Amino acid sequence: MARPLRREYPDTIYHVINRGNYRSDVFGSVGAAEAFLKALEEATERCGWRLGAYVVMRNHFHLALQIPEPNLSADMQWLQVTFASRFNRLRNQQRLLFQGRYRLFCVENTEQWARVADYIHLNPMRAGIVSVSHLGSFR
């Protein structure tokens, strides 16, 4: 049975989350994280996203973004397939990188967007990966 289509609206702010298949450390290496950031930069330019916040953890990522057109599903597919293709090609592998469909939360207004951005940016500190003083240098 097919999944229900997601309702998307132009100029809407979303909090997007996805993680590695079986919670694997997709971004465990610095190179993998940098490659994802490169693909994210390309997607942002290609899709016209307004990226408000992001974090790339070892096994998942968070994005807070505003989309100009209601085509986030196609755009996220491009981002994830592009990164997965590059990741697998470099390692000579053929595996699913992500757990499946990304999670998506609609952000109602700019005040909530600020709270989501805080949540995203504080994620590495809450996970005990970095201290507050080094939070700004985390990917």
Image (cartoon, rainbow, N blue to C red):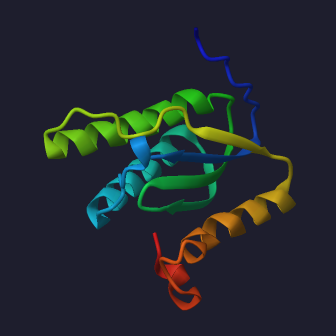
Residue 85, percent from left and from top: 28, 36
Q: Residue at x 61, y 74 (%)?
A: 126
Q: Is residue 41 left or right of residue 73?
A: left
Q: Residue at x 45, y 52 (%)?
A: 41
Q: Residue at x 36, y 55 (%)?
A: 25
Q: Is residue 27 left or right of residue 120?
A: left
Q: Residue at x 61, y 17 (%)?
A: 3
Q: How many marks?
A: 0
75, above or below 119, in the image: above
Q: Is residue 19 left or right of residue 69?
A: left
Residue 101, percent from left and from top: 54, 32
Residue 114, percent from left and from top: 77, 65
123, above or below 70, in the image: below
Viewer-nearest residue: 132 or 50 = 132
Q: Residue furthest front?
A: 22
Residue 134, percent from left and from top: 50, 86
- Image quadrant of residue 33? bottom left
Viewer-nearest residue: 69 or 64 = 64
Q: Quadrant of the N terminus?
A: top right
Q: Residue furthest bottom?
A: 133
